[in-house]
Amino acid sequence: MAAALISLQQLPLELTQDERLLASIPTNDLWKQEIKDQFSRRKTWSLATVKSVVWVVIIFLFALIDSFVSLDSVAGSYEGHAICIIWLWLPCLVIGWLRVPTFTGGELWSAPRFANQQPVKKVITKVRQATTTDGPPKQIPIRTGRKRLVIDPVPEINEENQKVEVESIQEYARREEIDQKASPLSNPTHHQSITSFQTHPEVHQGHDHLTVSVNPNANQSAISIARPVQPSINPEMDELLILQKLTSLNRDEHRLTATFNYSRIMRYLVLVDDVLTTLDKLAREKDEVGFSRKRLTEVVSIIINRRGSLPLGLPPLYSQRRRSCSLWERSPQCSTRRLWPSFSSAE
Amino acid sequence: MFNAAVMALILQCGMTAAAMIIVALSPTIGLGCLSLGYTIYGGTAIVIMFLTITSTIFARITETREERSTIVKGFTAFIAIALRRITFLLALINGVGLIVLSCFQFSHFLDNCYCNASVLSRGADSYIIVLYTGSVTTMRNSRIIGTFLSGVVMVIYMVFIWFTSASPVNIDDS
């Protein structure tokens, strides 16, 4: 990150004191590598630039010699000398440009976007490969800079498990409806106010109980989720279950599988906003996957709240898109344009 | 921002001053057509730089002060963008003017009696030198001073650029 920040020294940057920012976790190594590569690019010396600078120096020397030789012979012999000197800032500036990495506005915006897309794309392609190929599930290794991130295979969902899942989800839906009737605070529009998330593994009729307290002021049992005990699925699966609950409106098995994949991505790369963007793209590609962006945002907020910190490399530039569009910008890219990118958190 | 502005000012003013020294201290000593053109060019460049800095300050106010109301933010943003565009236009005009001045100079358009006599500053006292033999020392000194000044400014700028920019090789991710 130091390299990227040094390279951007011609920009007014802003670093906030938010503890979630610039967290160095191995998951973000790939992203950091990308952002470093993007921001370390500079225009290096080429044969053309060398030739131009040498040519300028030669001309300057000629003018100098002419000026001093013809001191007393030609009237107005100082003119060439003066012109050379008054244009001398130009080679200085050119050499400076070659030394300092400079970015135009478009490059500045495309660099973090590109860097954000790369890890997500890689993970998605890996997951797709793993899900489309037949045979037993394999572990998916993904190179992330120095360290090695290993993604678990997407769990095979056989029919029995699916039935159980679908039934349980229907059960959640029923309970949620009941809870919504009971307390208006558990309305989906109030999911922004999720502040705490706790798991209470209790054995109750062969089910684990996950308690999501939607609002601390509300009753503790705003939403309660039951999930069947499945030893084949790792203990972090409750996030996936929440994701399923929130995303699979129609309990179709294809959608269930798709949400499994997406939740995998989301779990391992919490580059929140770009994951969402990529997921939007994927959702457009796959018509059968129906979920709303808002619900996914809720899921991400749950995951973040549960982890206590957001392992986020760069605060999402896109999340300010609606606020930053103000009176004075009318370009079509108004939504993502700002006067300069502010490396501060959205919330 | 302060360092960059100061260095740009030093580069700009140093080069213009060096050219001015050479032109104005050559006989006939005084402000002629060419030196007036250089003065206008340098002065406009300084004005442009300060307007640009003002624009960035306003842009920063707009972007960072979250507590300001929308009207205030819109106003400051309007000022910032208007100043940016005005300075861009001014810089364009200034650069074209310098090119035109250079063309005049090369084509000996300014090599007339009025300009060579430095009438602009000397007025009724102006004169033209026909034989330069008597003022060789003054001319040589002025040219040496001008060249030396421009060289010093160039070296200062290069050293600044070299030591404040990151080395492309030794970038360490730490």
Image: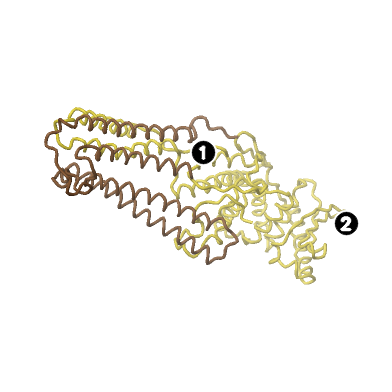
User: What color scheme is it?
Assistant: by chain
* Nearer-the-camera pick, B44 or A311: B44
Q: Which amino acid does label 2 sit on?
A: His
Q: How far apart are marks 1 and 2 (CA)?
A: 53 Å
Query: Can residue A1 be seen?
Result: yes
Chain B's colour? brown
Would you identify the image quadrant in which residue B28 lies?
top left
Q: Pointers 1 and 2 in contact (CB under 8 A)?
A: no
- Asked whether, in this view, residue B111 is left or right of residue A294, the answer is left
* Nearer-the-camera pick, A196 or A339: A339
Q: Residue A115 appears at what percent x and percent y? A: 54, 44
Q: Residue A334 appears at what percent x and percent y? A: 48, 60
Q: Which amino acid does label 1 sit on?
A: Asp
Q: Mark 1 points at which residue?
A: A37
Q: Residue B136 appears at what percent x and percent y? A: 19, 30
Taking A129 as reference, is B169 above or below it? above
Position of the C terminus of chain A by quadrant: bottom right
Callout 2: residue from which chain? A
Q: Which of marks 1 and 2 is in front?
A: 1
* Nearer-the-camera pick, A221 or A230: A221
Q: Residue A204 carries which label?
A: 2
* Nearer-the-camera pick, A234 or B71: B71
Please report the residue visible at 68 percent of the width from the left and 49 percent of the height from the top. Answer: A310
Q: Residue A208 appears at what percent x and percent y? A: 83, 54
Chain A's colour? yellow
Callout 1: residue from which chain? A
Farthest residue, direction left: B130
Q: How crowded is mark 1: few (under 14 residues within 10 Å), some or many (20 or more)?
A: some
Q: What element carries label 2?
A: loop
